[in-house]
Image (spheres, grey):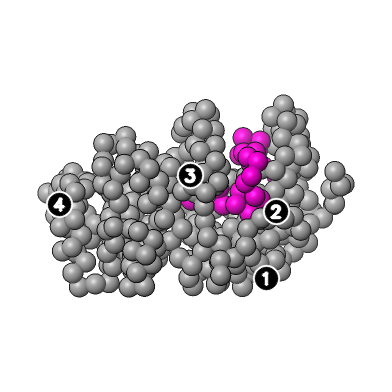
Amino acid sequence: MPETPETMRALMLTGEDALEVQEVPVPRPKAGQMLVRMAASPVNPSDLMTVKGRYGTKAEYPFVPGLEGSGTVVASGAGLMARWMMGRRVALATGTGGMWAEYAVVAAARAIPLPAGVSLGSGAMSAVNPLTAISLLSLAQKGGHRAVVSTGAGGQLGRMIRKRAEAKGVTVINTVRRAEQVAALEAEGARHVLNSSDARFDADLAQLCRDMRCRMAFDAVGGDLTGRLVEALAPRSEVLVYGALAQAAIQLHPGTMIFKEATVQGFWLSKYLPRKSLPQMLWQAREATQALKGGFAVSDVARIVPLDRATEGIAAYAEAMSAGKTLIRLSDDDLGVAPAT
């Protein structure tokens, strides 16, 4: 295995909305940690929030963003698991950042070996979206829900929720914000698709919720849409807010919440997963990586950009998130994926 260099290139966040490539020391693993030569890292909505200083995990500037990625383990600190991972291709999810660099140090428990047949490019996108879909549907099933509303359904995670729900026997009412997204979802075979910009949206959503006795929603948008969900859902409903695509404060009428006995609460994967036992976490991670083999966890890739053009790719992703993922290439490794044409 090639000798690890002393320095590396990293995309540093030096302040709000201020990204620049810098030459920095390669981090060194401590006990229970390992050093990974990074192959790729995607851009997620949570990464966009990090860049704007709005994500829940705060760090002092400057720091390296990037919440997930993939690569090859090239060094380890003390610990059996870290040593066992040596030389393996792994998927990574830190919850704190550090992936937009040529090398990253992670705890051994934060890495999952990639199965044979799963590329480094696919593996880079195996954590945030797939594990969110698995977790949200798990909560729906635990609550006995046979139907859910999914907002922001035109994106990659919306598609994963839809496919995961179909496999688990849960019906999804998909809401999007543009007419072209309605057409795209219907072309994929989605049955219930509503555009929140349409004049009849609220009435149609309420009717579907009544017909399906729907009492749960997964909200990736926020803003006034959260309140509209509460209005449409059946009494004693639950809205799990896991995104903020609207970049606006949630609007709720207190009377609706009181008289419908509605619950609105946040869902943050980085807090939800650590509450699980280690076997449960490993099982869900295995489900996610196995589902990269043509299953619900497959993401479309809109573009692959080198590190020195990462800011261009991040901006392009922010403009059209439903078009597919932006992957930041961090090495010359074969990623095994290509942008959709």
- Check contact, mark 2 vs mark 1: CB within 8 A: no
- Count of number-bearing discs: 4
- x and y percentages locating residue 185 in the rendered image: 36, 63
Q: Give 315 or 179, whichever is nearer the viewer.
A: 179
- x and y percentages locating residue 311 in the rendered image: 62, 70
Q: CA distance from mark 2 to mark 3?
A: 21 Å
Q: Earlier in the sequence, mark 1 or mark 3?
A: 3
Q: Can you identify the residue that label 1 sits on? A: 309
The amino acid type of the residue labelled 4 equals: Arg
Q: Residue 212, which numbered label?
A: none
Taking the image as shown, residue 164 lies to the left or right of residue 205, namely right
Q: Can you identify the residue that label 4 sits on? A: 210
Q: Give 203 or 31, whichever is nearer the viewer.
A: 203
Q: Earlier in the sequence, mark 3 or mark 4?
A: 3
- The residue shown at (49%, 60%) is 45
Does 107 lie within the magenta span? yes
Q: CA distance from mark 1 to mark 3?
A: 28 Å
Q: Earlier in the sequence, mark 2 or mark 3?
A: 2
Q: CA distance from mark 3 to mark 4?
A: 29 Å
The amino acid type of the residue labelled 1 equals: Arg
- The residue shown at (30%, 51%) is 172
Q: Residue 39, which numbered label?
A: 2
Taking the image as shown, residue 160 lies to the left or right of residue 329, namely left
- Check contact, mark 1 vs mark 3: CB within 8 A: no
Crowd tier of the residue under label 3, counting other residues whose Cα lies within 10 Å: few below 14, some 14–19, many 20 or above = many
Taking the image as shown, residue 293 lies to the left or right of residue 74, namely left
Which range of residues does the magenta coloring cover?
A: 105-129
Crowd tier of the residue under label 1, counting other residues whose Cα lies within 10 Å: few below 14, some 14–19, many 20 or above = some
The amino acid type of the residue labelled 2 equals: Ala
Q: Can you identify the residue that label 3 sits on? A: 131
